[in-house]
Image: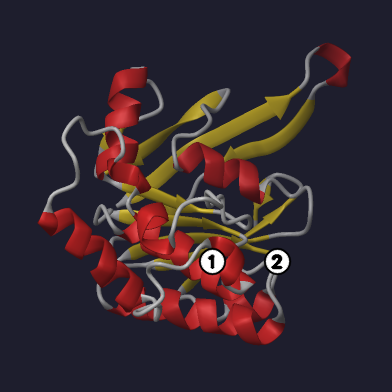
Amino acid sequence: MLRTESITHRYGEGSAAVTVLDNVSINIPKGGFTSIVGRSGSGKSTLLSIISSLLRPDHGEVYFKDREITSISGVETDKLRKEDFSIIFQSHHLLPYLTAHENVLLPFLDRLAPAGKDILQRGLDCLEQVGLSGKENRLPGQLSGGEQQRIAIARALVKSPSILFADEPCGSLDKSTGNEIMEILQQLNREGLTIAMVTHDHIHASMSKDTIYLEDGRSI
């Protein structure tokens, strides 16, 4: 479903330039659950930013469904993110003054018309999918860190993406809550969702189907 060819990326210029990714080629199959693992500074989060179209590489290509997406226009990239890509981060990025249900529906805020009954129900269904049925009217501050991350996952699911990108989704959670989030991701994958996840936790990585190891900007 998604692959890269010889991705290279640097930060800085001239003698101060640092190569973060060096000739990285990976493949994430449709229906796969792939973990990208490495120590801090290995380039794993940069790689996730590139394959999720948040960042353009200096060299190399990214292909999604056999379409090269590194050189497409900004309008086409926005369309790709709206229709096919969803991303969850270590920080939940929830709006504190919106309810759980309203936060889940944020991807539809760019629509001119108010959300219809079908979209409202879709938001409730996604909250139920992550175990938050009955808590749709609570504000983020009334929920635990794990529950807030579940809202972030539901928000990523509400538009039915083709692939879910997760950047350290359990990084700010305790061990037990982190394992619960991983179980949700495993279930989503069993239901057919393709997932690419960055993690430094080898136990969580072992809960995925495939693992890509990065060291000093190279896949090993």
User: Can you identify the residue that label 1 sits on?
Assistant: 149
Disc 1 to disc 2, C-alpha distance: 10 Å
Between 83 and 129, the residue placed more toward the observer is 129
> Can see residue 72?
no
| Residue 212, image x, y percentages | 57, 61
User: What's the residue at 24%, 42% (across, down)?
Assistant: 83
Amino acid type, label 1: Gln
Circles 1, 2 touching at the beta carbon (< 8 Å): yes
| Residue 84, image x, y percentages | 28, 46
Q: Report helix, strand or loop for mark 2.
A: loop
Q: Is residue 212 left or right of residue 153?
A: right
Question: Which quadrant would residue 144 be assigned to in this image?
Answer: bottom right
Question: Which quadrant would residue 188 be assigned to in this image?
Answer: bottom left
> Can see residue 158?
yes
For marks 1 and 2 on the same chain, the one whose residue lies earlier in the sequence = 1
Q: In this view, does 126 lie to the left or right of 119?
A: right
User: Can you identify the residue that label 2 sits on?
Assistant: 172
Q: Report helix, strand or loop for mark 1.
A: helix
Q: Is residue 194 left or right of residue 198?
A: left
| Residue 162, image x, y percentages | 27, 54
User: What's the residue at 50%, 45% (across, down)?
Assistant: 25
Amino acid type, label 2: Ser
Instruction: Kindly give the residue lying farthest to the top in the view shown.
Output: 14
Packing grade of label 1 (10 A; few <14, some 14-19, many >=20) is: many
| Residue 101, image x, y percentages | 36, 61
Q: Is residue 131 left or right of residue 142?
A: left
Vertical placement of residue 94 versus 77, above or below: below
User: What's the residue at 53%, 66% (across, down)?
Assistant: 149
Instruction: Kindly give the residue lying farthest to the right in the view shown.
Output: 15
Coloring basis for residues: secondary structure
- The quadrant in which the C terminus is found is bottom right
